[in-house]
Amino acid sequence: MPQLPTFADVRAAADRLAGTAHRTPVLRSRRIDEEVGAQVVFKCENLQRMGAFKFRGAFNALSRFDERQRDAGVVTFSSGNHAQAIALSARELGMPATIVMPTDAPASKVAATKGYGGQVVTYDRYTEDREAIGRRMATERGMTLVPPYDHPDIIAGQGTAALELFEEVGTLDALFVPLGGGGLLAGTALSTRQLAPDCRLYGVEPAAGDDGQQSLRSGHVVRIDPPRTIADGAATPSLGEHNFAIIQRDVDDVLTATDDELVEAMRRFAATMKLVVEPTGCLGLAAALARRDDVAGQRVGVIVSGGNVDLDRYATLLADGPSPT
Amino acid sequence: MPQLPTFADVRAAADRLAGTAHRTPVLRSRRIDEEVGAQVVFKCENLQRMGAFKFRGAFNALSRFDERQRDAGVVTFSSGNHAQAIALSARELGMPATIVMPTDAPASKVAATKGYGGQVVTYDRYTEDREAIGRRMATERGMTLVPPYDHPDIIAGQGTAALELFEEVGTLDALFVPLGGGGLLAGTALSTRQLAPDCRLYGVEPAAGDDGQQSLRSGHVVRIDPPRTIADGAATPSLGEHNFAIIQRDVDDVLTATDDELVEAMRRFAATMKLVVEPTGCLGLAAALARRDDVAGQRVGVIVSGGNVDLDRYATLLADGPSPT
């Protein structure tokens, strides 16, 4: 059984993040309230530094390094928002960061990671194991490995978004949270069970990769092939161990959303709320719209996890399909 | 000489708007700070109700109606954000609203105005005069005409955005404000001269329609043919009379931005700040980027006026041109 973080760790993370992370706005739209048939509040982590909640966990983890760890630096593996979060956090804290990314990672993500000062090491995703590379570099060079979600400090940091949300709006009847490896959902669970114990808490993952739902319902971590979905931030093969233990204990259910539902939610965010939200960030709204009957008349929260999407890709997704009215 | 509103009118408008208009967030981006070479704060009126600052002025004007005026209702002419602002404000205040719109107005704008309960009357923009139609309806049916910008209550209402901005961030060295008919700029001037008297205040209009710049420099209102620009919210033929009187007294200069600069700013807003901003709303950032040398190291404000842009059009504008790095 792994050592699990607690709400006290979330509080401590919030203290470390104060003045460095944005306290992101909580936004509302009466139009969307009408469409969902509920009062909906959105915690906008797409407006977080580097464009996603991932900065919270990464900065929290790195700010706990001791002097020896800071000198040797951090290593991680990620082709997504965690890469940028680690690179930016390391720069803020004045330590070197090495990011293991696949050779075919999008040029924009590689450029963004380098732009924050991260050193990028590439690997062939078809023949090499990124975790093994990360571990080897950690061992050989004395660097500390900080994985994307399966880590107590990452989970505690991600929990600060929901902490801020509850501080601002009080309790809620239901809360919808994007689910990939489970860092955001597990952290949110710690804050929810402390600050809004009666709130129904839902993880939402891509329908193409419902390993989280299978895991929760079967009682053990289910591993699947990496799913094909536009929600690249949630295209994970399995939940982390720490994450699953908390999710199993504290989360009411795991729901799914199809890519079509994500595109529809993305278009609503743009047309109605004037927010650029990446596909993964649309999981919560998509699920709330699909479960209108369950949340009718209630106070509902949605965590918008991020907004990092290549502009050309975003333009293509917006242009397909009908305009929201 | 028209009766000009004062800062006291802006304060009174703020009281009327409290609890009805959103107090929109002030957002920052360190990436954009680096690009401009200054500390830049954005007052995000694209996140205002109905997607633009126009709600402030419209609601302020309508909330001052007496009982007789409320019974007969409001009439206005607009094919843009003012139409939706009047329709929504009238609905909030329980009075009828008639909007005179051109027969070739975008279907999305007509639908949005009707969606807020406005009654739409169409006219042929090539053979009929919308102002005359509005005045005739006002006379014949006892309705009160509320024009889009040349009105003291509209100006006072629009000034509340800058009032909130200064309350939140203190004084600034320079402030960039989109300029069409001059409602937002004149209102902003009232708040600026009271709350940040030394702040340099700039209106920014489309380069294709520089009537505001010509007016300020010549000392009288210059009228031009409606300009061809993607900044449809600022494609006005001339400043209002009230507006010009305040702008001439209180504004330091009027700058211009080209359509290409607006598209570049729009792409930066999407990629870096995750905000959907309509072309007119990009005028301030475009000017700040163009005047890097003048604002180097200073504290700079930008008012983002709105985010109402047809999604297909928005997708097309995003897809053209290079990605911001």
Image (cartoon, coloured by chain):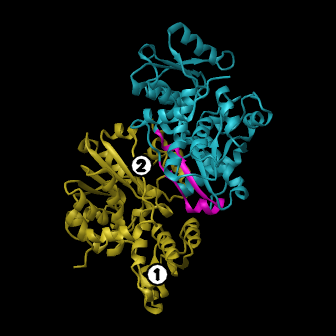
Chain colours: A cyan, B yellow
Q: Quadrant of residue B252?
A: bottom left
Q: Position of residue B295 (x, y in %)?
A: 25, 44
Asked if residue B197 is among those painted magenta in the image, a careful observer would answer: no
The circle on residue B264 is none
Q: Amino acid at mark 2?
A: Asp
From the image, state whether disc 1 or disc 2 is nearer to you: 1
Q: Position of residue A26 (x, y in %)?
A: 50, 51
Q: CA distance from mark 1 to mark 2?
A: 36 Å
User: Can see residue A52?
Assistant: no
Q: Which residue is mark 1?
A: B75
Q: Residues within 10 Å of mark 2 (few under 14, many from 20)?
A: few
Q: Position of residue B226 (x, y in %)?
A: 39, 67
Q: Nearer the viewer, residue A154 or A49?
A: A154
Q: Chain of mark 2?
A: B
Who comes first in sequence, dot 1 or dot 2?
1
Can you say which quadrant of the picture contains the N terminus of chain A? Answer: top right
**Start-end of magenta stretch:** A25-48
Q: Is residue B72 above or below residue A263?
A: below
Q: Position of residue A218 (x, y in %)?
A: 80, 33
User: Can see residue B278?
Assistant: yes
Same subunit, labels 1 and 2: the answer reads yes
